Amino acid sequence: GAQEDAQAGLLLKPNGAQTFTARGLARFVVKQLPLAFEDFSSAVSADPKYALAHFGLGSVLSSQNRPREALKHLNRAVELEPDAAVVRVVRGTVRDKMRDFAGAAEDYTAVLRIAPSFEWAHYYRGRAYREMKKYPQAVEDYTAFLQRNPDHEEALYFRSNAYFLLNDQERAVKDLDRILLVNPRHGLAFANRGVARSETGDIHGALSDLRK
């Protein structure tokens, strides 16, 4: 397996950053986080300018719920490899956890520049914009994501919420209608549709939803 191959590489080149990183990645995939942490730390010590080692170490630290330490290594990885989309994605999620939504949006924007077909960057950036109360931008990103994932309940729900806050109740209701077609037991969709319908004057529909 990958760990055995990396172990053989260590025997040949015991201080090799690439080999430590390869074994660290193999261990990270199978959730052996303490061992992966040791390997990535050894890789960084062997070659402080090896971006993949910093990325691996940052990923482990993020998985261990240590975002500030993770960010230090992910920042270094971005400095070394600014066009590595996967590094930007992970740093964006860490920034999001730390409620640095502007920083997260910056990373997802970079991802879309580097890899325009990665639609999940629209989803993640939409969430960041929503938290920043930039609702028109959030709607744009959720719409781009939904073009490829038209039945994604969370994206529909969050876009409907953004429409509601933009006083576009009709579009909010349409998104909630779509959710309920996909999942007829979505209680929050019924409740929010009831509120949106009341805002449009559809009192009968609102009461029907709110009773469910």
Image (spheres, grey):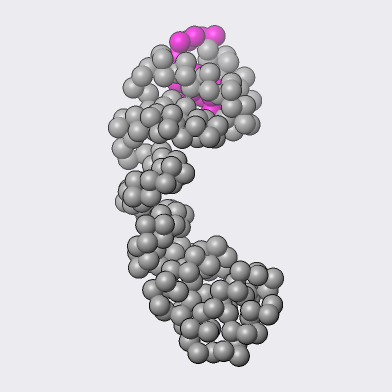
Find out whether residue 17 is within the magenta segment: yes
Q: Nearer the viewer, residue 53 or 189?
A: 189
Q: Which residues are magenta?
A: 11-26
* Residue drawn at the location 49% of the way across and 9% of the way down: 14
Q: Is residue 7 visible?
A: yes
- Whether residue 210 is situated above or below residue 108 in the rendered picture: below
- Whether residue 108 is situated above or below residue 152 in the rendered picture: above
**Lateral position of residue 190 relative to residue 140, left or right:** right
Q: Position of residue 78 (x, y in %)?
A: 34, 35
Q: Is residue 104 visible?
A: no
Q: Nearer the viewer, residue 39 or 1?
A: 39
- Whether residue 62 is situated above or below residue 134 in the rendered picture: above
* Residue drawn at the location 37% of the way across and 23% of the way down: 50
State which quadrant residue 117 falls in: bottom left
**Lateral position of residue 136 relative to residue 202, left or right:** left
Q: Position of residue 33 (x, y in %)?
A: 59, 27
* Residue drawn at the location 41% of the way across and 60% of the way down: 130
**Lateral position of residue 161 relative to residue 78, left or right:** right
Looking at the figure, which quarter contains the N terminus?
A: top right
State which quadrant residue 212 falls in: bottom right
Q: Position of residue 97 (x, y in %)?
A: 47, 44
Q: Position of residue 195 (x, y in %)?
A: 54, 78
